[in-house]
Structures are given as structure tokens and as C-alpha cells.
Image: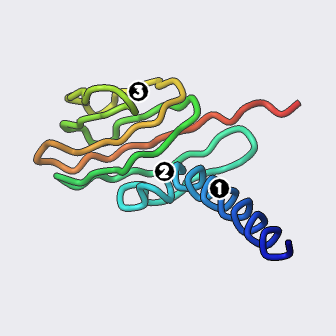
Amino acid sequence: MKTIKTIIMALIFGIFFFQSASMYAQDPMKAAHNVYRKVLLENDKVRVMEVVFAPGATAAMHSHPNHTVYVVDGGKIEITEKGKKAMAMDIKAGTAIYIPAVSHMAKNTGMTTLKLIVTEMKPAKK
């Protein structure tokens, strides 16, 4: 009986651990740390991040709440939303884009380094 109880507790812990790890891995600062370089500002309202994509660089699948992207240095990027086909875009410097909450991955398909400022909106606290 003690062995069964130990096995059940281990399974429960394992399920909790792996669910937490997969949710945590969706954070772009962790999942795509190769392009999400640093947090410029974070408070209870927003998180502002610097993103730098070298040519050919890929940001692994990650998630954002509602967010904006300001293009500092433009170029070609391919965005693949979870469960959808890839979408190629040529984004120009000085462009600001609003994107609803999403899980996606991205790849710099051009020959120039893309530099972006991503601002995530945090839900209002009650």
C-alpha cells in the first residue's frame, strides 16, 4: 500500500512539474533567449523587451499576451502561429504593429539584422 501511495505521489508531482515547465518555457525571454536579448522595462502594466534577429536566426515557439512591436531595423521575417501556416512579411523600420495574444515562432529570412522592441500588456489587477 505504501508503494502505491509513493507511486501516485510521484506521478502527481511529475505531472505538475512538466505542466509548469511547459508553461514556463512559453516565456519568450526563456524559450527564445537567443533573440530576446533583454528586458528594458517591467512593471505591473507592461514588459518591454529588446529583440535582435541575426540573418537566419529563429525564435522557438513562445507565447505573448496582447503586445506591440516597434521595428527599429527592418527586414524579412516569417511568423508561424501555433497550428497555422507560416506567414512571410517584409517589415519596415519605424513601423508599429499591434498583435493580439498569440503563441508563435519566428525566423529572420532576410539578409539584414532585425531589431525590434516588443511591449507586452499585462492584464489589469482587480
Tell which tag, 1 or 2, sits nearer the viewer.
1
- Which residue is depicted at the point 23% across and 37% down? 77
Answer left or right for 55 relative to 91.
left
Residue furthest to the front in view is 1
> Considering only vertical position in the picture, is 17 above or below 88?
below
Which residue in the protein does label 1 denote?
A: 20
Give 61 or 7, whichever is nearer the viewer: 7
* Mark found first going from the N terminus, 1 or 2: 1
Q: Secondary structure at mark 3?
A: strand
Dot 1 alpha-carbon crowd within 10 angstroms: few under 14, some 14 to 19, many 20 or more: few
Report how far apart the C-alphas of labels 1 and 3 lie in the structure.
33 Å
The disc labelled 2 sits on which kind of residue?
A: Pro
Q: What colouring style does the render use? A: rainbow
Which residue in the protein does label 2 denote?
A: 28
The disc labelled 3 sits on which kind of residue?
A: Ala
Quarter of the image that includes the C terminus: top right
Dot 2 alpha-carbon crowd within 10 angstroms: few under 14, some 14 to 19, many 20 or more: many
* Mark found first going from the N terminus, 2 or 3: 2
- What is the count of numbered marks? 3
> Considering only vertical position in the picture, is 68 above or below 7?
above
